[in-house]
Image (spheres, rainbow, N blue to C red):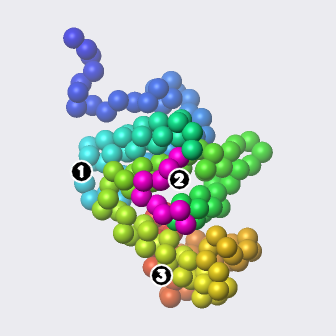
Amino acid sequence: MSNHDDNEPTIPAAASSGTMNRRDLLAAMAATAGAFALPTNARAAEVSRDVAIAHAARRRARGRYDPKVYTEHEWKTVQMLVDYIIPKDDRSGSATDAAVPEFMDTFLDIEPGMRVAHRGGLAWLDHQMRRSTTKDFISATDAERRALLDEIAFPRNAKPEYSHGVAWFNSF
């Protein structure tokens, strides 16, 4: 007989050892943020998070990751956007190095109710960029992308017409 209660969540090895590397921490942060947005009970959200982490890790371990939910353009946008949020530095890899896009795609695959709002935000980002530059987000220059992100990253400073983008980006 096991001391493990089937109703209790299992703790990933990295968390139970008391040390977490940056990838584990990023995955946990992303999972926790997504879990709070789910319209499900806490246990279901926890299971969805754990499943998404496991699936994303297995898919990434196989080599090239093929998105289940994102279009090719959305996939490139997500990869670029997460690296603006968590860039590579001298001590750690970027969000893409930590498989954050794979996690997000897997999570959306498991929780289809979140797809419309999430993908709508990506479309909003391209639309706003086209209004100011005639290019989509990934085709814009680094300076153009940063200028738009600065408009939506700080809710208190955002223009009212960017309210939808601000809400989406802050949930991203």
Q: Residue at x 26, y 43 (%)?
A: 43
Is residue 68 covered in magenta?
yes
Given residues 91 and 71, the one toward you in this image is 71
Who comes first in sequence, dot 1 or dot 3?
Answer: 1
Real-space Cα separation, disc 1 to disc 2, in angstroms: 25 Å
Q: Is residue 122 magenta?
A: no
The quadrant in which residue 154 appears is: bottom right
Residue position for label 2 = 101
Q: Which residues are magenta?
A: 65-73
Task: Please tell me whether mark 2 sits on a helix, a strand or a loop.
Answer: helix
Q: Kindly report which numbered mark, 1 or 2, lies closer to the viewer in this rendering.
A: 2
- Name the foreground residue: 141 vs 32: 141
> Residue at left 40%, top 30%?
11
Determine whether 8 is above or below 82 in the image.
above
Above or below residue 80? Residue 131 is below
Compare residues 98 and 64 and report the one nearer the observer.
Answer: 64
Quarter where residue 46 is shown: top left
**x 56%, y 83%: residue:** 128
Furthest toward the top, the residue is: 1
Disc 1 on helix, strand or loop? loop
- The secondary structure that most of the magenta stretch takes on is loop
**Residue assigned mark 3:** 163
Q: Considering only order in the chain, which callout, 2 or 1, is on the residue closer to the N terminus?
A: 1
| Foreground label between 3 and 2 | 2
Task: Indicate the amino acid at tag 1.
Answer: Asn
Residue at the spot x=57%, y=39% of the render? 63
Residue 166 position within the rendered picture, expressed as x and y whole percent measured from the top left: 50, 75
Q: Which residue is mark 1?
A: 41
x%, y% of residue 126?
Answer: 56, 77
Query: Which comes sooner in the sequence, label 3 or label 2?
Result: 2
